[in-house]
Image (cartoon, coloured by chain):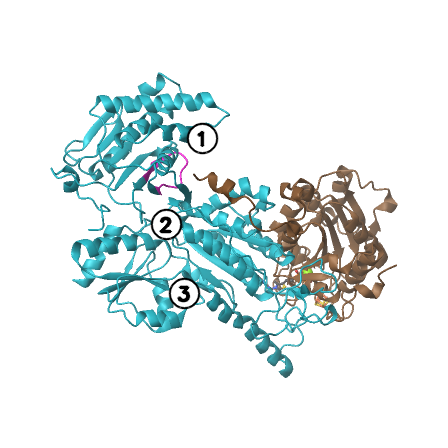
Chain colours: A brown, B cyan
């Protein structure tokens, strides 16, 4: 193998709290790009703002650590300028399902060839523990101290299925090996891949802990789920959190490799990647003639 | 007198014939009546007749109904505004008659449909011909299409001005082209019916204009911006529709792909700006365009580009604010917004073209500045300039293309030592594009060290990093020095030793010049104007030099608070003696500026 595992690591040590679920996501991502032997200079990891969004600094690829909620459109811009790059987005639940949810939906319906890892800890970590769009009903947080959350949590899996994502998976920081496999599958998939990573915040979320998940998760593949069946995927998706909280499905909900990607349909790409095109106008007279 | 620019009725009506140098047609009706297409056809005919041409459309945000009108002015000499009262008004409904009949110049004419529209002869000026023509009935002899009556009226106007009918033919060919030759043919017949009607009713106005019939280029400021961007090699445009910036998206959507430009309508202006940042980071020349409302949504993201040192060009075509304001009306009220966009200090340049030529040149230059200084450049225009048609000289597409310092250019250390945010004297650090082997880095919106490692989270506050932060911030802000040198300086236009100096920026330029010519010719006062193609970084030294000779000044701005005047004062300590602000949605008229000048110097 050309690239060692360490090649993908940067010199910067993660600043996360010991035990933070995000370590597992970092490890899985590193494992996946290593397994695929991606050239680090052809990978761009885009993030927003949050504990989880610090991730790009810890790898040796290109990165863009953008503003809160806008990682997805930054990634889309990068992809549209240079479709030859491997573009990934990493960030938190607040970043992607809260402030950035509009961009998230539109990126999925466009089916960009982008892989999106959301470190879903059901809390705002970096801002020290307020409710997030995936916090459970009733959960007491700094911003919901009296009666707890009174809003329904967003279900990213159903949202992704409904919005046109063509690779939809959920994984858990307690199982790096499976997570790495799902991430690898997402990167290989041509089209938009959403990977919702249940990634416990050990500091601010005392409800959705490693143990909470260990007691509840089950593997979709082992129960014979067929990821090409969208109806079945919806049925599994609404199991949690929409209808109950005792069994949480993990694994690949849905995959459809046949849908054309946004990049496939973009007319400007017929000339090749925009970043490689010559600048300027060769025949300005032709352009000006239109105004005569 | 400045020759023929401002013909008085006497010039034309009196026994001594004075050659007239310009003409103006005003077309009015309800939205949906085809006002703008009729006026656009006439503008084309005017430009092809060899006239310098200038249009202004007054419209509202409705698709049907309301009252809309467009004025097309043509001149043998270069024009500076859409002019004042028209020679001919073409009324497509009664309201147009009611609103505009009194404006028609003596010796002019009003064209209207006798079946349905009535003039009030007590309201019109002396010698104005009331040309009631059965427009609809004549049109119906050729086609059931209701809009054809406009063509009959257009033909009448063309004949009133003695213009060559071959330009009518060619204009229709452009519209219906080879695809529907029979429709072009039908319209030509309709136009001829209009011309014949005028012949039978006393013939042309006999203005005596000598048309060169050498066609001129006719375009809007927005089209000129789009062409400037293409000339500079733009490869990416993301935009969300908003009047009056939408026509940039429309034009680029048609033409961009041929030049390898990705053109996208996206979900909102936050996405538009962020995608543009992403594209700029990935190495293409990228831009977005919007009006004030959309720009307000872009401010966090444009500051991000300042912090991550990502090149991009943002076009801000202003309309009347605040809030949704008057969506179809002009204003220069977004200067504070552009100056203050984004939290904290970050280096930016703001360019304000005065006319389509500058729209082209400054937009092209903006892409160089953006890449040389790795920071956003804002080009500010407004509805009056962006949507009005003007004739222009042929653009020179041979614009310089300078892409700025790249890490791979050599002499900047090897990849291992590469520091994306290396501290330099110019403030510019060598850039590396994703895909370049060995120069991997993370663009960071948090404060960072030269290597791009963050100092925001765990290191800030430590003495060493207090210093790091200071150095990094100063590095970025040093770019302003270079930007100041590389942007066009202020200009003083007109007489030396003037009694009064106008202070203007952006599209107000034309009406200001016209007003100056008018008062200098008619009232013997000497006036000049101080103009600012670059708003920021402010050219304080150059401005101060120019201000030294100023006896008295009048700032003319399309806003209430004098946003530019305040900037001028903040940067130079100079306070304009007088202020003339316009914020009723209409563009400055030269006559109003002239009156203000006379009031001030009296
Ligand atoms: C526009 C804006 N609003 C608010 C913030 C403050 N902020 C930073 S991170 C964050 C939430 C982070 O939550 P999440 O995305 O779930 O990431 P986590 O820290 O949990 O990984 C907020 C509100 C900001 N940086 N920018
Ligand atoms: S606060 Fe929570 S999310 Fe943030 S690093 Fe600590 S454990 Fe992780
Ligand atoms: Mg979170």
| Residue located beneath label 3 in the image | B489
Q: Taken as a whole, is the magenta stretch helix, strand or loop? A: strand
Distance from disc 2 to disc 1, alpha carbons, whole Å, reads 28 Å
Q: Residue at x 78, y 65 (%)?
A: A23
Q: The disc numbered 2 marks a residue on which chain?
A: B
Q: Is residue B62 magenta?
A: yes
> Which of A149/B245 is in front?
B245
In the image: residue B290, left or right of residue B586: right
Distance from disc 2 to disc 3, alpha carbons, whole Å, reads 25 Å
Q: Earlier in the sequence, mark 2 or mark 3?
A: 2
> Which of B453/B47 is in front?
B47
Whether residue A100 is situated above or below residue B117 in the rendered picture: below
> Badge 1 local density, few (<14 within 10 Å), some, or many (20+)?
some
Q: Element type at marker 3?
A: loop
Label annotation for residue B175: 1
Q: Is residue A149 magenta?
A: no
Name the spot of residue B306 as percent of width and height, x first: 55, 64
Q: Element type at marker 2?
A: loop
């Amino acid at each position: 193998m050309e690239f060692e595992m360490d090649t993908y690591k940067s010199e910067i040590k993660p600043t996360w709290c010991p035990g933070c679920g995000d370590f597992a996501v970092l490890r899985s991502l590193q494992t996946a790009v290593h397994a695929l032997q991606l050239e680090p200079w052809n990978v761009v990891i885009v993030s927003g703002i949050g504990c989880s969004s610090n991730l790009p600094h810890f790898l040796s690829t290109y990165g863009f650590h953008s503003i809160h909620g806008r990682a997805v459109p930054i990634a889309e811009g990068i992809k549209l300028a240079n479709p030859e790059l491997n573009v990934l987005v990493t960030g938190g639940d607040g970043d992607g399902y809260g402030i950035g949810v509009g961009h998230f939906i539109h990126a999925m319906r466009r089916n960009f060839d982008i892989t999106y890892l959301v470190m879903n800890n059901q809390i705002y970590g970096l801002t020290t523990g307020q409710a997030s769009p995936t916090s459970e009903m009733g959960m007491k947080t700094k911003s919901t101290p009296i009666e707890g959350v009174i809003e329904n949590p967003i279900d990213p899996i159903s949202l992704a299925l409904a919005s046109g994502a063509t690779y939809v998976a959920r994984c858990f920081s307690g199982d790096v090996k499976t997570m790495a496999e799902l991430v690898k599958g997402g990167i290989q998939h041509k089209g938009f891949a959403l990977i919702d990573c249940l990634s416990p915040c050990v500091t601010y979320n005392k409800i959705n802990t490693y143990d909470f998940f260990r007691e509840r998760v089950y593997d979709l593949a082992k129960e014979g789920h067929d990821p090409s069946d969208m109806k079945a995927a919806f049925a599994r998706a609404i199991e949690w959190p929409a209808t109950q909280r005792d069994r949480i499905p993990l694994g690949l909900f849905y995959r459809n490799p046949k849908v054309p990607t946004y990049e496939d349909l973009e007319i400007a790409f017929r000339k090749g990647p925009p970043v490689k095109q010559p600048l300027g106008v060769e025949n300005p007279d032709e352009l000006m003639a239109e105004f005569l | 007198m400045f020759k023929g620019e401002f013909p008085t009725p006497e010039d034309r009506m009196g026994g001594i014939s004075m050659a007239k140098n310009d003409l103006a047609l005003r077309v009015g009706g309800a939205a949906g009546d085809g006002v703008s297409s009729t006026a656009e056809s006439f503008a084309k005919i005017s430009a092809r007749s060899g006239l310098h041409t200038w249009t202004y459309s007054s419209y509202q945000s409705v698709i049907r109904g309301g009252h809309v009108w467009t004025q097309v002015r043509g001149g043998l000499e270069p024009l500076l505004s859409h002019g004042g009262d028209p020679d001919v008004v073409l009324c497509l409904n009664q309201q147009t008659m009611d609103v505009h009949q009194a404006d028609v110049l003596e010796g002019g004419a009003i064209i209207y449909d006798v079946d349905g529209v009535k003039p009030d002869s007590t309201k019109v000026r002396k010698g104005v011909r009331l040309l009631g023509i059965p427009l609809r009935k004549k049109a119906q002899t050729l086609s059931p299409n209701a809009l054809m009556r406009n063509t009959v009226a257009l033909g009448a106007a063309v004949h009133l001005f003695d213009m060559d009918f071959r330009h009518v033919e060619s204009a229709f060919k452009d519209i219906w082209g080879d695809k529907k030759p029979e429709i072009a043919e039908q319209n030509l017949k309709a136009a001829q019916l209009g011309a014949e009607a005028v012949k039978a009713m006393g013939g042309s106005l006999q203005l005596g204009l000598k048309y060169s019939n050498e066609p001129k280029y006719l375009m809007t400021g927005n089209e000129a911006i789009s062409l400037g961007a293409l000339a500079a090699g733009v490869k990416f445009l993301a935009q969300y529709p908003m009047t009056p910036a939408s026509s940039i998206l429309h034009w680029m959507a048609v033409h961009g792909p041929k030049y390898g430009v990705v053109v996208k309508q996206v979900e909102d202006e936050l996405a538009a700006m962020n995608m543009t940042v992403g594209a700029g980071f990935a190495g293409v020349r990228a831009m977005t365009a919007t009006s004030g409302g959309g720009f307000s949504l872009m401010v966090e993201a444009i500051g991000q580009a300042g912090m991550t040192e990502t090149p991009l060009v943002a076009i801000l075509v202003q309309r009347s604010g605040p809030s949704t304001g008057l969506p179809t009306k002009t204003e220069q009220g977004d200067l504070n917004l552009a100056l203050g966009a984004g939290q904290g200090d970050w280096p930016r340049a703001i360019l304000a073209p005065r006319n389509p030529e500058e729209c082209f040149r400054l937009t092209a230059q903006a892409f160089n500045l953006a890449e040389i200084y790795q920071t956003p450049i804002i080009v500010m225009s407004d509805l009056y300039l962006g949507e009005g048609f003007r004739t222009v000289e042929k653009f020179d597409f041979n614009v310089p293309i300078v892409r700025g310092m790249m890490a791979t250019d050599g002499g900047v250390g090897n990849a291992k030592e590469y520091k994306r945010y290396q501290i330099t004297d110019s403030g510019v650090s060598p850039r590396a594009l994703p895909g370049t082997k060995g120069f991997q880095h993370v663009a960071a919106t948090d404060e960072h060290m030269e290597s791009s490692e963050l100092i925001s989270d765990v290191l800030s506050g430590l003495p060493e990093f207090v210093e790091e932060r200071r150095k990094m911030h100063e590095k970025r802000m040093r770019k302003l020095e270079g930007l100041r040198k590389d942007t066009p300086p202020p200009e003083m236009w007109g007489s030396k030793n003037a009694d009064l100096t106008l202070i203007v920026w952006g599209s107000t330029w034309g009406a200001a010049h016209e007003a100056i010519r008018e008062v200098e010719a008619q009232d013997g006062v000497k006036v000049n104007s101080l103009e600012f193609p670059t708003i920021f970084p402010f050219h304080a030294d150059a401005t101060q030099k120019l201000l030294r000779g100023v006896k008295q000044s009048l700032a003319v701005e399309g806003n209430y608070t004098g946003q530019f005047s305040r900037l001028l004062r903040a940067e130079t300590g100079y306070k304009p003696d007088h202020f003339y602000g316009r914020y009723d949605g209409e563009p400055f008229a030269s006559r109003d500026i002239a009156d203000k000048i006379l009031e001030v110097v009296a």
